[in-house]
């Protein structure tokens, strides 16, 4: 969902500009950088700009290099170190006049702001200190989500994470909140993290997906992928696993027994996929002598972060109890990166020995 779509949704729900800015800040937290003291969002319609200007801390015109910027500026807050500007810009006099007339007809009179004034308005000089303090606080509150994202990027189809930053539960604001995540996949994956209180975690479990629950609660449309049919039947899951083994891992299917698939690589290494459920699965790598050399499984018998799913990178007698988080989903088509890494490591070790 774009910022423009979010602004329109907030306006449709009759939220004012400050409430809309609060929603936008939850997303903008993901784009803060240490050398940019302002987050800028191009607005695609004058009525959306008007919506943001009505409650802005400053509505003004800023001219830079012959380009006129109509700005709705929201100042820094205790929880957000950068100013936010929602704007429309144009170098064309007729377009500038048209926008100016529209805004003035709706009660918005815009002073012209010079560069020196603008720097003071966004408090650019104090930003490095604010950013450092914010970053320390944000990392403390979101470190567990960052660790999950890093692991998922390494071992699954996930390519990035988006943290919906709130002080408490995303729905009700309760301080007693817990990390909740949802993943959207369309070729690559995006993991979305948020905090929900216990009551809303339980309520979310009764919905088709977490994204659908949040969308319903907040009155916004769910991202398109969350409305796709959930594939749970064994035949469809098995077909997708076959495809992952053949196309992504370059295997030939050797045999299928119930929910277990055995496939072989050109190297003679085998991968055995057991997928009884998304929370009951294993991926086993065997060498050409059919000896197990590594494994990912979901058995809850190790104390591991982000568990219970975990990785045995080396199943030799001296190392078989050394485990680490696998960050896997339990769906082979999403976990191929981690499975491939185990196979290629085992094949390289076999070749070198």
Image (cartoon, helix red, strand yellow):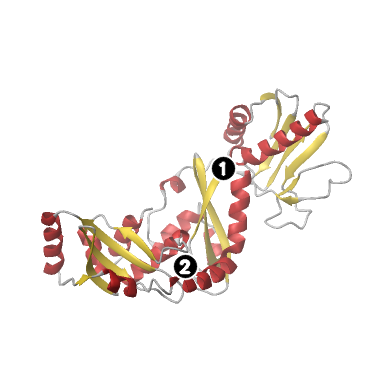
Please tell me in which quadrant of the rendered image residue 76 appears: bottom left
Q: Dot 2, how many residues are within 10 Å of its Cα: few (below 14), some (14-19), or many (20+)?
A: some
Q: Residue at x 41, y 69 (%)?
A: 82
Q: Dot 1, how many residues are within 10 Å of its Cα: few (below 14), some (14-19), or many (20+)?
A: many
Closer to the chain start, of discs 1 and 2, is: 1
| Mark closer to the observer (1, 2) | 1
Could you say which disc has been placed on residue 157 in the image?
1
The answer to whether residue 54 is visible is: no
Residue 332, percent from left and from top: 63, 38
Please tell me in which quadrant of the rendered image residue 349 appears: top right
Could you say which disc has been placed on residue 171 in the image?
2
Q: Residue at x 55, y 71 (%)?
A: 137
Using residue 309 as the reference point, say whether residue 153 is left or right of it: left
Q: Contact (CB < 8 A) between labels 1 and 2?
A: no
Q: Element at badge 1?
A: loop
| Vertical position of residue 218 compared to residue 256: above or below | below
Q: Element at badge 2?
A: loop
| Vertical position of residue 271 compared to residue 35: above or below | above
Please tell me in which quadrant of the rendered image residue 6 appears: bottom left
The answer to whether residue 22 is visible is: yes
Residue 115, percent from left and from top: 28, 69
Q: Residue at x 45, y 59 (%)?
A: 31
- Most extreme residue toward the bottom, as rendered? 78
Say which quadrant the C terminus sits in: top right
Could you say which disc has been placed on residue 108 in the image?
none
Residue 43, percent from left and from top: 27, 57
Given residues 102 and 5, the one toward you in this image is: 102
Using residue 51 as the reference point, say whether residue 23 is left or right of it: right
| Vertical position of residue 3 compared to residue 234: above or below | below
Using residue 353 as the reference point, say whether residue 27 is left or right of it: left
């Amino acid at each position: 969902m774009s910022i423009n779509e979010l602004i329109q949704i907030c306006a449709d729900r009759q939220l004012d500009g400050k409430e809309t800015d609060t929603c936008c800040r939850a997303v903008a937290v993901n784009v803060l950088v240490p050398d940019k003291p302002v987050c800028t969002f191009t607005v695609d319609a004058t009525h959306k700009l008007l919506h943001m200007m009505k409650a802005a801390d400053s509505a003004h015109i800023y001219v830079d290099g012959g380009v006129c910027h109509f700005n709705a500026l929201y100042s820094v807050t205790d929880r957000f170190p950068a100013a936010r500007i929602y704007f429309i810009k144009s170098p064309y006099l007729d377009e500038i006049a048209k926008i100016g007339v529209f805004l003035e007809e709706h009660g918005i009179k815009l002073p012209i702001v010079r560069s020196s004034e603008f720097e003071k308005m966004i408090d650019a000089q104090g930003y490095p200190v604010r950013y450092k303090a914010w970053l320390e606080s944000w990392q403390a509150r979101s470190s567990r989500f960052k660790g999950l994202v890093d692991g998922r990027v390494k071992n699954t189809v996930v390519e990035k994470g988006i943290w919906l930053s709130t002080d408490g539960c995303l729905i009700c604001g309760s301080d007693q909140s817990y990390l909740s995540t949802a993943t959207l996949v369309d070729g690559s994956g995006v993991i979305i993290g948020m905090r929900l209180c216990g009551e809303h975690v339980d309520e979310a479990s009764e919905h088709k997906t977490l994204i659908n629950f949040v969308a319903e609660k907040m009155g916004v449309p769910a991202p398109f992928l969350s409305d796709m049919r959930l594939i749970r039947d064994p035949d469809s899951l098995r077909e997708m696993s076959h495809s992952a083994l053949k196309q992504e891992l370059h295997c030939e299917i050797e045999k299928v027994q119930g929910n277990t698939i055995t496939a072989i690589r050109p190297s003679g290494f085998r991968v055995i996929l057991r997928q009884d459920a998304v929370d009951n699965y294993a991926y086993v790598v065997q060498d050409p002598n059919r000896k197990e050399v590594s494994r990912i499984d979901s058995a809850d018998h190790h104390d591991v972060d982000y568990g219970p799913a975990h990785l045995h990178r080396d199943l030799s007698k001296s190392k078989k109890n050394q485990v680490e988080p696998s960050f896997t989903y339990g769906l082979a088509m999403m976990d191929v990166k981690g499975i491939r890494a185990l196979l290629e490591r085992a094949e390289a070790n076999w070749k070198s020995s």
